[in-house]
Amino acid sequence: MATSQKVAAPAAAKKSQGFTGIRGAFWIIVLCFIAALCIFNLVLGNGDNFQGGDNANAPVNILGTIFKGGYVVPVIHTLLLTVLCLTVERWLALKTAFGKKNLTKFVANIKAALKANDFDKAEKLCNEMRGSVANVVLASLHAYKDMESGANATLKKSQKVAKIQQAHEEATQLEMPTLQMNLPIIATIVTLGTLTGLLGTVTGMIRSFQALAAGGGGDSLALSTGISEALVNTAFGIATSWCAVISYNFFTNKIDKLTYALDEVGYTIAQTYEANHTDEA
């Protein structure tokens, strides 16, 4: 019962630590699609962007040209808006996960407290820091104290060290889904953005040549206009993938940095216990 209460304490702290991400990413995509349709029809399709005030006519500016890219345009815009929204969502979530203070300094202070066997100070630092690293360190410290209790007196030192490491690993695994949440969607859009842009370009080129064939002539102006409209899709597709790549790599690197910090502190806690109990069998 005592152990379960100790585990419950970090869990309660985690619930109150702040924004940890949006789990219903599907609704973000739906809202982005609705926003993309509104932009496509109300902004890009506005009559002021076309000759005679009718979007069925030739465009007079870049907004009209984008509109002529067809209904692949709102699909690409949905992907782009999704990347931007999830980037903001991940930034806020990881900002919470990293805690309220500098991560490097926190790890150094924790290691110094452990070296001095000042576990009360280490817990205080965790309570001040909060975030994923603090949650994991607290779980490891609770496991350390649990090994000090009489209930585990029959265990060998190696078994106790293993249990501390196990508690650290389990706490880390509980935090990782929150850290990596929605990143697979961004990773998928890296490829999907370019492919959707190419799809829009190909369909636009097909429409252009069909129009030329139906007219029975080689109107170079109509062909160049159609090509420019089709290539708009490629430009937006590449821009979407570009944003997705930067976003994915940025957050992956931040998660790696946090994971390294967790491993370093977990190793230090286990080694501290082993050094302080050299007299055990």
Image: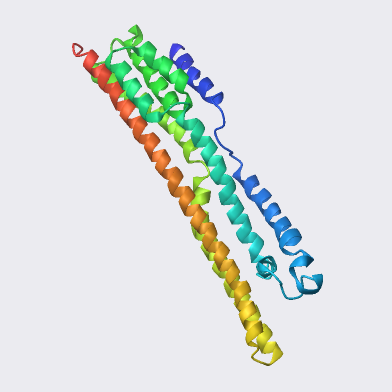
Residue at 48%, 26% (x, y): give it. 100
State the residue in front, 55 or 192.
55
In the rendering, at what x and y percent does residue 98 appear? 45, 31
Q: Is residue 203 in sight in this rendering?
A: no
* Depicted 4 relative to depicted 56: above or below: above
Q: Is residue 99 in sight in this rendering?
A: yes
Q: Is residue 109 left or right of residue 180?
A: left
Q: Is residue 261 left or right of residue 86?
A: left
In the rendering, at what x and y percent does residue 109 appear? 34, 21
In the rendering, at what x and y percent does residue 40 appear? 71, 61
Q: What is the residue that sits farthest to the bottom in this orientation?
A: 216
Residue at 35%, 26% (x, y): give it. 107
State the residue in front, 151 or 187.
187
Q: Is residue 6 left or right of residue 57?
A: left
Q: Quadrant of residue 150?
A: top left
Residue at 45%, 23% (x, y): give it. 129
* Depicted 209 relative to depicted 119: above or below: below
- Indicate the colouring scheme: rainbow
* Depicted 276 relative to depicted 260: above or below: above
Q: Is residue 49 left or right of residue 105?
A: right
Quadrant (top left, top right, bottom left, bottom right) of the C terminus: top left
In the rendering, at what x and y percent does residue 143 appear? 37, 18
Q: What is the residue that sits farthest to the top in this orientation?
A: 150
